[in-house]
Image (tube, rainbow, N blue to C red):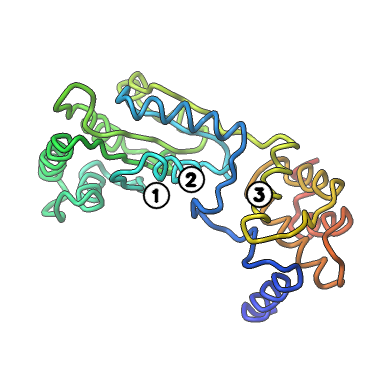
Amino acid sequence: MTLFVIAEAFSLYEAHFGLSGRPFGETVSTSAFVSLPSRDTVLRRIRYGLEHGQGPALIFGAAGTGKTMLARTLARDLGGTSAHVVFPAMPGGELLALLAEELGAGSAEDNTVAGPLKRIRLWLASASARGERPLLIVDEAHLIDDPTTFESLRLLLNFATNGPPDLSLLLVGGPEILLRIPPGLADRLTARCLLGPLTAKESAAYLLGRLSAVGASSPLFSPEALDSLHHAADGMPRRLNRLADLALLIAYAEGQPGPDSRAVSIAARELDFEGLAA
């Protein structure tokens, strides 16, 4: 099946179910964020520390738990200037040069530590004078294997014009980040928040929330189907998206008013999720 045919099929299922868009498409747009108890707890804890300049924070968890979405939502809620680095696995000098550009502190002149660090320091001091504390999100931080990269991030936290650091730092990564982060930076963390799978109740609320965001006039999924989705996806948001998306397509192809547990089982077999959740 060509990409065009697949895209057309998804478009048709949207019309079939009366939706204004594809509810479970892959996205990190904060408009798709669904407020859930476990996620709201992490947001409150991280936000409090960052807003009060208490030091860097860490969100970690397995792939597909929604870490990037949560980080972007936090940046949105905090407002102000932010930079989001999604591939930090580079030498410290290169990372600082990239950050200088991302933060608007000037274009890269060299990839040494000194040049970009100076430009960032001056820019942060200017932001502090305006009463601002920019946020730096370092995503996929578990991929960093160069000690100078972590050291460069630690150095940024030494810039403090009026007491607290001029920069807020949020590290986001897989569980292995706990083994990679050096003591000098780990000791400064004010919050380490594990993002785990959703509960069955949260999975249902997540799925219904995503449907509501695109104008669904009914739940579409029966309670039994919602429960099947949760167990097949093991409560992982990314898997829930893929399963629910395919289940809707299957229901549309069969002319059904919504996916049932059978459609979810077919989707799970197609995506090979049954063995994962067993």
Q: Viewed as shown, does residue 118 lie left or right of 82?
A: left
Residue at x 72% of width, y 68% of height = 18
Relative height, residue 216 to residue 237 (above, below): below
Q: Are marks 1 and 2 in contact (CB under 8 Å)?
A: yes
Quarter-wise, where is residue 118 in the image? Answer: top left
Question: Rounded to the nearest whole Å, what is the CA distance between mark 1 and mark 2?
Answer: 9 Å
- Percent across and percent down for residue 108 are 15, 54
* Element assignment for label 2: helix
Identify the disc placed on residue 164.
Answer: none
Question: Rounded to the nearest whole Å, what is the CA distance between mark 3 and mark 1?
Answer: 27 Å
* Element assignment for label 1: loop
Q: Nearer the viewer, residue 77 or 53?
A: 77
User: Where is mark 2, residue-wise?
Assistant: 68
User: Where is mark 3, residue-wise?
Assistant: 209
Relative height, residue 278 to residue 18 (above, below): above
Name the amino acid, label 2: Thr
Name the amino acid, label 1: Val
